[in-house]
Amino acid sequence: MNDIQVKEFIQVLQQYELSIAALYETFANILPSSKDTWLKFSKEERLHAKWINVLHSHMKGEIISFEQTNMTTQATKTSISYIESQIDKAKESQVDLKQALIIAIDIERSLLESAFLRVFQLKGSKGKKIQSKLFEATKAHIKGLIEWQANIRKA
């Protein structure tokens, strides 16, 4: 990838994280009884977008290099479109908490399985730390969502 393609890809990755945040904010608005939890998840997704920007700044300083992956800019844009369609559906049909959790778990798992977080081949310790934080935060989201879902099933 050339510099322009890398910059576009980074912007799309940030947009992807922000679209997940928007989905969680939609759930917060539709599901007032769980509003605070959804807003917490949304805030964390916005933080992830900032971390991606920090990783990109390390690229400019040649601290890290870009690793080729199967994940393309177009595939990421398709994922964003899917999330946006879920936002529209949630607004139209007023999803319930069980449905919202299924959607969120699916998106977070997809994120983890897609190599999204392994896009950067890191050389510096600070960049590696940020990448590790992104990976662990996504795993924590999945775990938290699954536990929340399990507690609802018990109720």
Image (spheres, grey):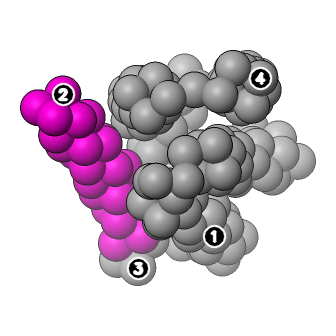
Say the numbered circle drawn on residue 126. Answer: 3
146 drawn magenta: yes
Q: Secondary structure at mark 1?
A: helix
Image quarter in which the C terminus is found:
top left
Q: Secondary structure at mark 4?
A: helix
Of the residues under marks 2 and 1, which one precedes in the sequence?
A: 1
On screen, residue 51 versus residue 75, left or right, reads: left
Query: On the image, numbered disc 4 is attached to which residue?
Result: 92
Range covered by the magenta-colored residues: 129-155
Say the numbered circle drawn on residue 153. Answer: 2
Report the residue at 57% width, 26% height from top. 95
Residue 4 percent coordinates (x, y):
88, 48
On screen, residue 154 versus residue 125, left or right, reads: left
Query: On the image, numbered disc 1 is attached to which residue?
Result: 50
Q: Secondary structure at mark 2?
A: helix
- Mark 3 closeness class: few <14, some 14–19, many ≥20 residues within 10 Å: some
Q: Amino acid at mark 3?
A: Lys
Measure how far apart labels 3 and 1 are at the Cα level. 14 Å
